[in-house]
Image: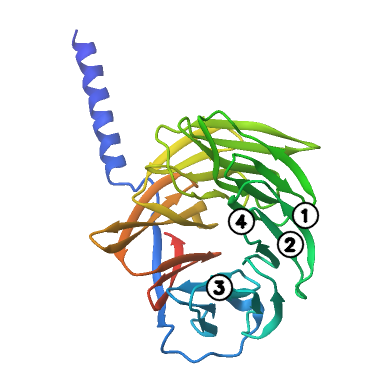
Amino acid sequence: MKNKKSKLSILLIALLVLYIILAFTPLSTELQLTPEWTFDITEQSTTSTSSLNVLPFRLGQNAGYFTHDGKIAFIKNFDYKTTISSSYMIPYSKTSTEFDVYNTQGEVCATISRGGFPYVAGDKIFVMLPGGSGFDYVDLAGNSLTRHFHTSPITAFNSGKNLTIAGYADGTLCTFDKNMVEQYTLTPGGSDTEVILGANVSPEGNYFACVSGQNNQRFVLYKNEANHAKIVYHRYLKKSIVHQTLVYFSNDESTVYYNDATGVGIVNIEKSRYSHIDIPGTILNIQESPVAESVYILSKKRERSHNIYTITILEKKSHKTSSFSFEAESAFILTDENSLFIGKDSKISKLVISKE
């Protein structure tokens, strides 16, 4: 009996020592965001710089390009809307029949004469045709390289390096290869009312995904295999959203994110594993950094006539570590390697991402 009590006492002491060690030993290091600079876009004059060293921004009715060291390369005020990428910026109005195309140095490198609304993705230029049911893929001379029509309005559109995707109000999903030749025409189906609310392609074009339908709304992930598209994951959403929504693939094509009624759905593609994180408001943008495989999600919620923006931070692509909110009229986020850039109204800040 004494031996049993002695062994139990030794075990309890050992467990207590282990608890003390674990309690005072950090189990993981924390992600750090260290401010480096902040500048006001309205108080800076433009500076000449290499187009390879600039990043795009859009804040309120101003858009342009800035440098990693906090200088404005080009800024332009626009009256209605503008579309901007890492290569081009095109301001336009409701009734535009001609668009000036600006490069990252602020030079007009082309003028496109045609009606509709422009859209840029990297170095690709598209024009959404009047009526909303078709689009042109154009060159810098404004020539239509390919034109695609459908019987229903476009409700979702994105373009990557090797694949372009268009979703329509009748629930049709179309993909196009890097030469803009139509590849697949699909109908995800499964819902009472068919409509594509969000769609995107992975960076290399190996996958594409959409949020589709009303009542029995669902998320559908396709793998782009030889000569056919294969559904590799789908999920019915508990609550339907009624507006256009965001779909985003990680740079390494391992993870896909989509905005649902209460936050962000996350799917590990290789393992077909789903997780969900509640996020306030509508997700506007998702960015990522190689540091701790961190992900930054910008969302916006309207509260008492004020815009409340929230940045939610994930590590290892899917584990929420923190979030912070701020009030602003307009905002953006952008990452580049170990840097996080945050735009708020007329100010842009750079924060260095580190793991310590």
Q: Residue 301 in the image: state x and y as whole percent.
A: 33, 56
Return the residue nearer the eye: 169 or 162.
Answer: 169
Disc 1 marks which residue? 180
Nearest the eye: 189 or 342: 189
Residue that mark 4 sits on: 132
State which tag comes first along the sequence, 2 or 1.
2
In front of the other: label 3 or label 4? 4
- Structural distance between the alpha carbons of marks 3 and 4: 27 Å
Pointer 3: what residue? 56
Marks 2/3: CA distance? Answer: 22 Å
In space, the residues marked 1 and 4 are separated at their CA atoms by: 18 Å
Q: Are marks 2 and 1 in contact (CB under 8 Å)?
A: yes
Residue 320: x %, y % from top left: 39, 47
Question: Along the horizontal axis of the image, is 4 left or right of 333?
Answer: left
Residue 18 visible from this viewpoint? yes
Element type where label 2 sits in the image: strand
Q: What residue type is labelled 2?
A: Tyr
> Which residue carries the number 2 mark?
137
Image quadrant containing the N terminus: top left
Q: Distance between the residues labelled 2 and 4?
A: 14 Å
Look at the picture and state if 58 lies above or below 188: below
